[in-house]
Every structure is written in C-alpha cells, then in structure tokens.
Image (cartoon, coloured by chain):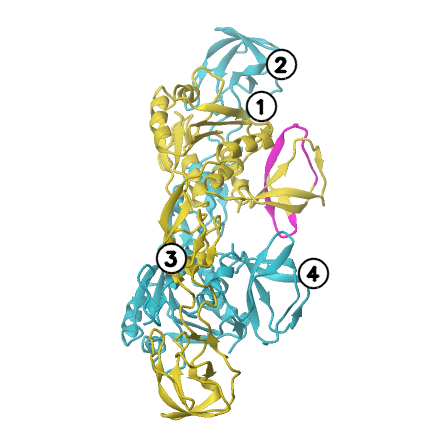
Chain colours: A yellow, B cyan
Amino acid sequence: MIQVEEALSIIVENSNSVSIEKIHVSKALGYILAETVYSPVAMPPFRQSLVDGYAFIHSERHQYDIAGISQAGEYSKIKLKENTTLRIFTGAFVPHNADTVVKEEHVMATENSILITRMPEQFENVRNKGEEISKEEIVFDANTLITPAAIGFLLSLGITEIDVYKKPKVAILVIGNEQVKPGNKLPKGKIYESNSAMLQAALQTIGIRKAKVYKVKNSPKVSKELKGILNKYDIVLISGRISPEDNDFIKEGLLENGVQKHFNTISQKPDQSMFFGSKHETLVFALPGNPAASLIDFYVYVYPAIKNRMGFSDIHLKKILRKLNDDHTNTSGKTLFLNTLHDETHVTILNSPNAATLNTLAIANSLLLFPNDVETLKKGQLVTLLQIE
Amino acid sequence: MIQVEEALSIIVENSNSVSIEKIHVSKALGYILAETVYSPVAMPPFRQSLVDGYAFIHSERHQYDIAGISQAGEYSKIKLKENTTLRIFTGAFVPHNADTVVKEEHVMATENSILITRMPEQFENVRNKGEEISKEEIVFDANTLITPAAIGFLLSLGITEIDVYKKPKVAILVIGNEQVKPGNKLPKGKIYESNSAMLQAALQTIGIRKAKVYKVKNSPKVSKELKGILNKYDIVLISGRISPEDNDFIKEGLLENGVQKHFNTISQKPDQSMFFGSKHETLVFALPGNPAASLIDFYVYVYPAIKNRMGFSDIHLKKILRKLNDDHTNTSGKTLFLNTLHDETHVTILNSPNAATLNTLAIANSLLLFPNDVETLKKGQLVTLLQIE
C-alpha cells in the first residue's frame, strides 16, 4: 500500500513519453504544440486602412479630388498626387504613397471631391505592414496550448499544418458477470453496467472522444481480450476489480500478457484498490468497481497520465484553496477524497467518506483532498480542492 | 450606440426560448436536464456485500460451516442456519437471513469451515437495499447539468433516455471578397479567411460541435444565402461587417429577409460594430471582421445567448476578481475588453486597447472588463475578469 503522492509520482514517471503528429490547424483545439512555429508572412501583409474613409498624403490641404476606390480584397495601383484621394474601406490596401486615412465621418463628400472637416494626424488610421507579426517571427513557442484564438491566428498567417503531441488512444475494458446493459430488465442479483459510458464522458471532457469500450465476462477470455487491446491502445482502463481471489481472471490476464505492476493499492478512501501497470508504452489502470470511486480515481490518476502524454506541463487537476463551511474529521489514517461544491470563497462537503456516491459527485465541482496526516479540518479553515468542472 | 450592459440585456431577453428533446443518457454530457428524473429502481437493488468475506447471522459464535458461495451477479436462494456461512464477494447478493459479513482477512478458513478471528459488529459490511436511492425517489431535479458522474448515476439506475434542452443549431456565414483559404497563395491585397475555423473552435468549447460554415462573396447573393440559412438554423454568426455604405450587401440581406435589428453598435473597444437581430426564434450576430474583436464578441455576447438557449442558469462568462499587476487608464469613455492572463491572485494585461490581437488573445485565460465610467485602474486594485479558458 502506497500513499497518494507516491502513486502520483509513479504515474507521472511512467506517462511522460510523447509522440508527435502533424494535424490540420482547424482540428487542433486542445492540443499542445510540439514545435516552434514561425510566420511565413507579415501580418497584415500590406498597409491596411483601419476605417472606412479616404486615403491621402498628409498636408495642410483640406480639399481633394477622388481619384478612385480601394475595396477590401483589391490591390490598387493608383499613385496619389498631393491633391487627390482614394475612397477606401476597412481592411483595404492603402496605396503606396498615401500615409493617412481620414474617417468618412470627418469629411463632406461630393461625387468627385471631399472636404476634410476634421484633420487626422499624419499616419492616423493606417495599420502598417507586419504590425502584428513580421515574416519569420515566432508565432508560438513549442508547448503552447492551441486555443480558438491560436487557431484563428495560425490560419490568418496561412499556416494550416502543425506538429502537436498525439492524444493517446484509450480503451475501456469492462469485466464482470453481474452487469446488465441499461435499458434491459434487471435480473435479481445483477446491476446495470454504467461505468463505461461514465468513463467515456469523463474522457470527452479532456478531448478524448473516441475511447472504445470492450466487454468480457470474468472468465479465461479476459486474457485473450486484453492481449488484443494492449497491442492497439496507449491507455487501457479496466473497469472491474483486482481481488486477491483465485478466480481473478484480470490479475491472471495482466500477468500472462506481461503487464508490469507498479502498484495495486493506495492508502485512500473511497476504495484503496487501484492497479496501475504498464507494458512497453501502454499504461493499464484497473479502476475500482464502485462507480464513484472509479470516477474519482479517473480524475486523480488517469487524468494526469493522459495530460502528460498529451504534452501538457500542468497535468494535475487544478488545485484551489477555499474556506471550509463545516468541521470534518478523518481518523482513518488514509487520504480522503470528498465530493465538494465550492464557490469563489467557500466549500461544502457533499458526502461522508464512507459513502462514495455518484449522486453527490454528479453535482460536485471539486474534490476535497483531506490529507492522511491531518485529523481535523475546522470550519473557516482554508482547504485544498481539486477542481473537476 | 448602446452600453455593454444594455446589449447583454437585449441578448438575454431575446435568447430565452428553449426547446426540449429526448436523448440517450450516454450522449448527454454538457446538456441541461429539462425534467425531474425519478428512479425506477432502488439502488443498490438488493443487499450487497461491501467486501470479500463470509456472510452469516450475527451471534457470539465464531465457528461456521461453509454452506455455499455468492458471486457478484448471482442470486443465491440459500437460507443460512445459525451455524452456517456463505462465501461472498464484493457487490454480491447477501442471502435473505444473513445480517453481517466478516472480511476474509478476519477469518481462518478451511475448505468447509471458518473461524472468525475478529468479530465484526452486527450489520457490518452489508450495504442495504436502496441505501443510495429508493424507488421513485428524485434522481436529479430539472435544470441539473449532466456531468460524467450524472451519466454514470442515471445509467446505473437503468435510465437510458432523458429530456434535455436542445443545443441550438449554429451556422457561420463568411462574407467577403478579400479572403483566401489558408494553404493557398495570398494574392496582393487579400487576407486569409481564418474567422470561420476560429469560431467553430470557440463553439466546440461550449459543446456545439457541428457549426456549419457557408461562404459567399460580398454581392447580391448574400441575401439569397441568408434566406436559406435563416430557415435552417437557430443562431447565425455572420463574419464580415455591417458598414454604413451603399455596397453593404449584408445589411440589405438582413433587411430583405425580415431580420429585426436590435442594435448594431456597442460603446466598447475593440470594435464597436456588432449587429444583433432576430427573425422569429433565430438569432443573428454580425461580428466584426477583425478576428480578435470577433472572438471577444463571441465570448461576451454569443456565448451567453447559446448558454441561455441550452437552459443554463449561469449563462455569462464566469466573473472573477484578481489584483492588477500594473496601472492602466481608459479615457475613451467606452468599455474596454483587454486580453489578460491571471493566476490564483493576480492578473496581467497582455495588449493595448487599440490593438486587438489574436497572438495575445491566444495565450489569454481571461478578459479584463474595464468599465466605461472608470478612468484609471491602479496596480494592486481588484479588477473584474471574465474567464475564457
């Protein structure tokens, strides 16, 4: 039996291998950039008007003849004279020798000429070439998270493909004889199988959308099924449990397939039993059968492993501090994870450590980390929460 | 020109109609429940053993003969006598007249009998029928957000279909002559079209995965394209801009198709021009052409409209308070939205209000809301941020 912190170190150590793939920028939301990206162009690529108005060569003169028009998307070759101006629109090309644009609100215009009623400063309303970024300048450093704005920026520079850290391929293997598919009638002694859809949803929240579910009876077939899965996936989540019993086909399957055990119990509540092992680069987590304990272990242990594989530097659930609304004690000597609901300042515990329940976890937005070496947390005290929303 | 707060009120008022659909629980992540859900079963559906051990009728007796076995998923009809016990596993059915389970660590066992070495309390290690939820009890109230744990809980009760508030169908209409698809060569005077993929990514972050993109030249075709889109979608995001010019086909298209204008400028920076209108239940936002301004308007205005349509009660970006790292002034008389990066206590402004840039928005995790009636924000002062991560 190991402590929570030790379990986390072992997982981090074993999940830090990454691989790189090239993907289209428009598909890259939530990935981490695996290269430094340089701009192939200057942005803006030409001098742009910031307003709808008239481009001219700045002087004391207020009256100009209209020599033409520059629409967005057009490239005007017109060369202005000191007494001519060009009708121009926002984002449009500012002709070579013009230096200033006057807003249309600040002129009186006829069809052929304008009178400037409020003179702009020289260079006003002109956005210079390369003002946002120069050619060959760094767009993003390696290890930048790809956000919607990053996607917009890369594409605006004409960059369509980038190297990112691959998302791991995840399989969920459900093992058990007692489980019935929800929607069917529940025979006596059986329960509904709900963990696989729950884990798929939890994976979705961190961008793993295609976790495949395999189901197998608790039988010698487990080993064969596991063999195929270990070859195809980067992370395997086993929903079932590893008991000390002879009839434990999971344990046997892991052994037969050469999965190296790193640990199988953690000094924690709810549920101390969680197996973590690996074979080559594939990680195997056997989560507890209790659904709430299973999901808590997913958040605390599987989540950082996946984030690590995806190249994130902050891989753990975000820690925040809040004031506790009530006294709580922990005499178990184990680390507790409690379902909690926090606001900007305070936190309320929703369940007892002896009842790991999904109904409270469903409405929780954090987990209280109750350290194993602390016996009492007092009302008003700042406590550490792991954010799960 | 209206103020930010007024613009938000108008949007909220016009986006509060919801519609309901029945979906499978496993697809319901991120939806809001539109009904109160009651449990069709008790959970657990029978008395369950919490441990691997032996079930017996509690007494002073320490020695018991093994009368059989109860595996998880099996329904044992065995009736125990005062001197018999049943081998039992975690989650398995506890036979009718047994009241207590002793952990296997606390017995000495032969093939046929056990000796209890550490006597449990009566009822210990037995989880009662209905301990988590009784039949007909409320599982979740209406308006509950469906989290991974909620999915697990509903399915564990055998509930597979629920009524949720529909996600709106969103279309993005890109209008312009100056835009080239990223990946192609950029002719003089043109820019890359990046707003549609950026808005698609931003929509993804709130669970709208299938926003369709339409592209049309700034021409009389806009009106026809708009007609088809207005009939098919709940929310239309127009990427382009509505200028006061004669050649504005967007304005004409909106007018021709009977889109009612609610406003088209907001007293804010970056970019005051954002059109908001509606036709029946369909909302139309014409976002500024500047990509950073467009994305900021998406976060501030489109995001709450979508959340409102999805039945959320907290529909705006989450507001948080942080200490400002530098002095900043705003003499524009307009509300500013600045790209900011905050940690648990402080916040740094990344850009000037005159330069709405995607490179800083890409690494921002919040927007500073700089009120129009405040001229100076001082270093160390608590300021309001809108969280965008």
Q: Amino acid at mark 1?
A: Met
Label pair 4/2, CB-CB below 8 angstroms: no
Label 4 resides on the chain identified as B
- Of A348 and A236, nearer the camera is A236
x then y, percent, for residue B14: 45, 68
For label 2, the residue is B118
Label 1 resides on the chain identified as A
Residue at 61 percent of width and 18 percent of height? B120
Secondary structure beneath label 1: loop
In the image: residue A138, left or right of residue A272: left
C-alpha gap between disc 2 and disc 1: 22 Å
Q: Amino acid at mark 4?
A: Gly
Secondary structure beneath label 3: loop
Secondary structure beneath label 2: loop
Q: Residues within 10 Å of mark 2 (few under 14, many from 20)?
A: few
- Of A25 and A375, nearer the camera is A25
> Is residue A386 visible in the rendered structure shown here?
yes
Region of the chain picked out in magenta, as a range: A327-346
C-alpha gap between disc 3 and disc 1: 50 Å
x then y, percent, for residue A240: 44, 27
Label pair 4/1, CB-CB below 8 angstroms: no
C-alpha gap between disc 4 and disc 1: 47 Å
For label 3, the residue is A159
Residue at 37 percent of width and 41 percent of height? A210
